[in-house]
Image (spheres, rainbow, N blue to C red):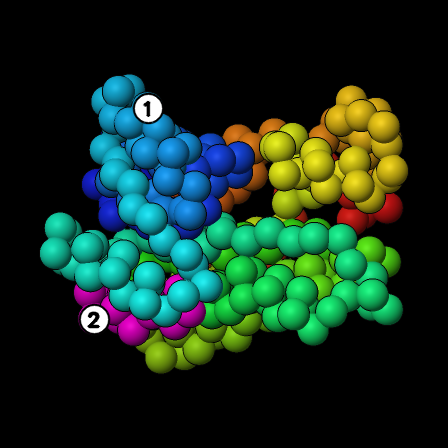
Amino acid sequence: MGRVQDKIALVTGAANGLGRATAELFAREGAIVLLTDIDDRNGEATAAAICANNGRARYMHHDASKPEDWNSVLDALRHAHGRLDILINNAGGGTYNDIETVTLAEWRRIMSINLDATFIGTQAAIRWMKETGGGSIVNVSSVAAFVGSPNLAAYCAAKAGINLLSKSAGVYCGQKGYGIRVNSVHPGLVETKAGVEMARLATGAGSDEEAIAMFTGLHPIGRIGQPDDIAQGILYLASDDSSFVTGSSLVIDGGFTAI
């Protein structure tokens, strides 16, 4: 039996990188996984690969910043399964903008795809899960929630918001007796296409390899993260292994924020 055997799990931003690794891990651990993203080609390919390896998965197009898209995704789950056991709010992203040069439009876009998307999904899941016996919500934030990067003003603010939103929601659901746990995960630099690009822009490195080498020195454990490192932490919070954990911030960063 897998650690999330026969659980109905929704993973947003699941076409690539961390989201893909999480969806694949959940499927190996027995979950029925709905992957969503705006990258339809890679989303469909990921779902097909999971099914080819005897997992259970399907893909839907989903802009997580749009309430109407959430309605469509959750309606599809209601029709197919009648419940949602696990929500992984992983969709997000950002660009490099300092506090002087970031425009209001850029600020709002980064807030929308990170904090707004997490809020919409968390609220909708709570309203449904409380009627079906509870569940687990894991919101993917970042170490940027704790470290003030000078060139990530909007991104840091959005990821910090996810952290406190998760704590507030976790306390609320606990006090209401809903049986819903809400936690956040805070990755350090992870070796994905988006993660390495961010590292290269942050350091001014001339290549991905140079950027990785520079960031490796900032992680006391001696390497940067791999997607499965973070997926394993997400699985822990989603599963019954963490039944006494809610409102928690799980930092998975190789010691980056411990320095």
Residue 41 shows up from this direction: yes
Q: Is residue 209 left or right of residue 234?
A: right
| Label placed on residue 49 | 1
Callout 1 secondary element: helix
* Residue in the image at 50% along x and 57% along y: 139
Span of residues in magenta: 120-133
* Residue in the image at 44% along x and 77% along y: 172
- Which amino acid does the dot numbered 1 rest on? Ala
| Residue 165 in the image, given as x and y percentages of width and height | 54, 71
* Residue in the image at 47% along x and 69% along y: 119
| Residue 195 in the image, given as x and y percentages of width and height | 66, 38
| Residue 230 in the image, given as x and y percentages of width and height | 56, 39
Callout 2 secondary element: loop
| Label placed on residue 131 | 2
Residue 198 on the magenta segment = no
Q: Is residue 244 left or right of residue 196?
A: left
| Label placed on residue 83 | none
SS majority, magenta: helix
* Residue in the image at 36% along x and 69% along y: 67
